Amino acid sequence: MMMFRGSSPAAAAAENSSTRTWSISSRGSTVSSSSSSGLSNDHHELHDVVDVSMEGEEVVGVAVGKEVKECKANLMWVLSNMDAILGNQRKKKKGRVLLLHVHRPAKTIPFMGANFPADQLHESEVAAFRQGETEAMNRSMAKYRVICARVKVPAVCKVAMEDEDDVWRGRF
């Protein structure tokens, strides 16, 4: 599970289960990472930093996958622990959830019972398959938003389209 926490317009911080932390600066558009295991300490550019914070409102970002069944427990945990995450034990601040999904289009496309590389098929077949992928992803994001709405936490969706293998660089 990866969560981003930040407030406008300062920065957001993230943690996942391997104790890796990320800082995102909306001013300098940089991402820095550090790991307690000492595996990495890289600096990369971040494109399209999204400022979803409103005045007096904090944002908690949750990375979600395309399968709602696999990510629902993580999202429910974040929603049920919003006060602790935001430090709202005494004063009740408003919080908002940023649902972040990195969409990686399939490199191979099923066609006539076999999988073919996308670059070997006609553009119309690839476009039809990509449209189906996008619709499925939109349905998943809508389901995540419904989960947030049930507990009365506003949610904003951000889908990063990634065409290359370098998702880890944060270029979206």
Image (tube, rainbow, N blue to C red):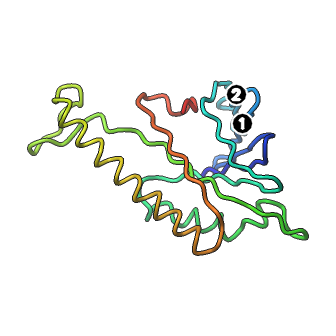
Q: Residues within 10 Å of mark 2 (few under 14, many from 20)?
A: some
Q: CA distance from mark 2 to mark 1?
A: 6 Å
Q: Is residue 138 left or right of residue 155?
A: left
Tell me the residue that label 2 is attached to.
30
Q: Nearer the viewer, residue 137 or 115?
A: 137
Residue 114 lies in what quarter of the image? top left
Residue 14: where, in percent of width, then height? 70, 46
Give the farthest residue toward the left: 112
**Label ID, residue 24:** 1
CB atoms of marks 2 and 1 within 8 Å: yes
Q: Give the side of residue 115 with respect to residue 18, left or right.
A: left
Foreground pick, 58 / 55: 55
Q: Earlier in the sequence, mark 2 or mark 1?
A: 1
Which quadrant of the view contains residue 74? bottom right
**Secondary structure at numbered mark 1:** strand
Where disc 2 sits, the SS reads strand
Give me the residue at 65% from left, 36% from top: 49
x 65%, y 58%: residue: 97
Question: Residue shown at 64%/47% (left/top)?
Answer: 18
Image: 40 above or below 101: above
The residue positioned farthest toward the right in the image shown: 90
Above-or-below relation of 43 to 8: above
